[in-house]
Image (cartoon, rainbow, N blue to C red):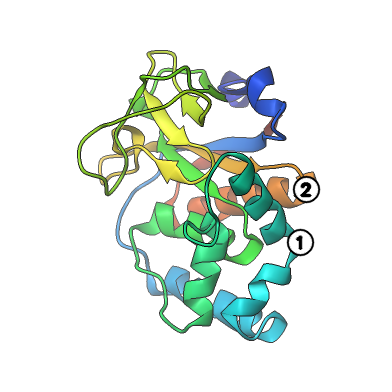
Amino acid sequence: MAGRYEGIVRVEPEASSLGIYVYYGVVIGVHVEASPAELLQEFDRVAEELKQVYGRPEELSRDPVIQAYRKFYWRIGIDPTKTRPAGEALARRLLRGRGLPSINNVVDAGNVVSARLFVPIGIYDLDKFEPPARITLSRGGEVFRPIGGRGEEKLKPGIPIMVDAKGVVMHLYPHRDSIDTCVKDETRSVLVVAAGVEGVPRERVEKAARDTLNLIERYAGGEAHGVWRSP
């Protein structure tokens, strides 16, 4: 069973040349529902950990992992002071005492890990895309339907994306996911992708993937498989 899913995510050479790499795994047989109190308390624990190490949101910018993601954002044409890397954005909310909105037990598990380790976590409905999911650069003209967006966006060339075998753009790397493959109440199996960039230790990204699989398994059930790396 486990070997069946190895290779379903591939980082193409043009993406790896930008320093992109991923660790990924799957959880089969999840039950998506509202997060239990125990999982929501994980956010409180992360908030306390962040306060002990950083104190204020402004101090996050000195962390080398956050610096690496910011550098990558600049490289792909995104101002990270306006569009924060996912992990940094989550951590900032917790340090400001604003808390994080609960989505469901699967998505919340990824957000806990991302806020703690600053590694972006993508979670996708395994039954809503055709493997392999390739991380590559857009050719231009691809259609992307973002979560929380209004309708469709047509992409310019050179944008790091994850696209399935049918051409569905699942993700703009490493910060925006598509509504076409997002986790919903009916989701039963998920793909978890931890997004690495140059300057972020591979062992940290691997830990982010493993921790997310473990939390999903604990709070949403199912059986976890992985973790694999590409490239």
Residue 128 x/y as whole percent:
34, 27
Q: Which amino acid does label 2 sit on?
A: Gly
Query: Residue 32: x percent and y percent?
Result: 33, 50
Q: Where is residue 104 in the image (x, y as percent from the top left)?
A: 34, 57
Q: Can residue 218 be seen in this view?
A: no
Q: Is residue 197 left or right of residue 212?
A: right
Image check: 140 left or right of 87? left
Q: In this view, does 56 lie above or below 197?
A: below
Q: Tell whether label 2 touches label 1 (CB within 8 Å).
A: yes
Which residue lies at the image location 67% right of the left edge and 78% below the top edge? Answer: 59
Residue 213 versus residue 80: which sits nearer the camera? Answer: 80
The residue located at (36%, 19%) in the rendering is 141
Can residue 199 be seen here? The reply is yes
- CA distance for labels 1 and 2: 8 Å
Instruction: Say which amino acid is labelled 1.
Output: Pro
Which quarter of the figure has residue 98? bottom left
Residue 226 percent coordinates (x, y): 64, 35
Residue for point 55% across, 79% down: 47
Mark 2 falls on what kind of element? loop
Q: Camera-side residue: 4 or 163? A: 163
Disc 1 designates what residue? 64
Q: How crowded is mark 2: few (under 14 residues within 10 Å), some or many (20 or more)?
A: some
Picture disc at residue 199: 2
Position of residue 96 relative to residue 167, above or below, is below
